[in-house]
Image (tube, helix red, strand yellow):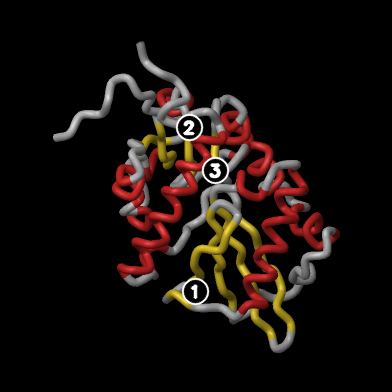
Amino acid sequence: MKLARPDIFHPRLVLAGCPAHAAGDPDDAGLLPALRARGLHARWLSWDDPDTSRADLVILRAAHDYAARRDEFLGWTRTVTNLLNPPEAIAWNLGEHYLRDLEGAGVPTRPVGLARPVDRSALVFVGGEQSHAFTESRSVEPDFEFWDLGYAAVAAAAEQVGIGVAELLYARVDVADRPSDVRLVGLDLVAPSLGWRRLDASTRGLAQRRFALAVASACERLGLGPFSHRRP
């Protein structure tokens, strides 16, 4: 096995799950190898594991119990040195008025009280850029108006919390497809399923490499790059 260079700083990365998924969700299989290919070594831990808060960078993924432990979870997000997505984005997205905020920013949203649409597509953004899209059963290739709406939603969300779009490692934008009326159904910046398993092997590999590259870029931005701290 090739040993890591001892003179180069290697950040401690954690992919955060929950007690029921402390070793990760099967949907995220492939993320650890993709990160390793970028020279980033991460491990899975539950978000409430004390070792998680001691990591240099924590990436929320399989934290499926956050809704049931909302106050505890939000408190924990403020104790992490570097969290992706950032805690201010998490707190805003968990607020009950986030859709209203987006509508006020000019993003077409589903009217309150409207029954759940039958046709809905999940758009995945990584590092502020489009990655892939899927439905509950398969991957899809949406038309440009879907992606335009997704870009508008992600940009408006970043503006709401005062961060750059690239600071959102991931975003899942759920869109309702109605005749001549494409609207936002929901935006998830917390720990959404990113639909990796619904992609074919080639597309999945490319998308997960894009994810790993975005993590590497975040490390550089946060001062966690390989040459940020030289070991004596």
Label number found at residue 29: none
Asked if disc 1 and disc 2 are in contact, CB closer than 8 Å, the reply is no
Q: Residue at x 20, y 29 (%)?
A: 3
Q: Residue 67 at x, y = what percent?
A: 58, 46
Q: Residue 83 at x, y = what percent?
A: 55, 35
The amino acid at mark 1 is: Thr
Q: CA distance from mark 1 to mark 2?
A: 30 Å
**Residue at the farthest bottom position:** 179
The amino acid at mark 2 is: Leu
The amino acid at mark 3 is: Tyr
Label number found at residue 135: 1
Query: What SS does tag 3 mark?
Result: loop
Q: Residue at x 44, y 55 (%)?
A: 210
Label number found at residue 66: 3
Residue with the mark numbered 2: 57
- Seen in the picture, residue 195 relative to 97 is either above or below; the reply is below
Within 10 Å of disc 2 (Cα), the crowding (few <14, some 14-19, many 20+) is many
Of the pair 125 and 87, the residue shown nearer to us? 125
Q: Between disc 2 and disc 3, whose residue precedes?
A: 2
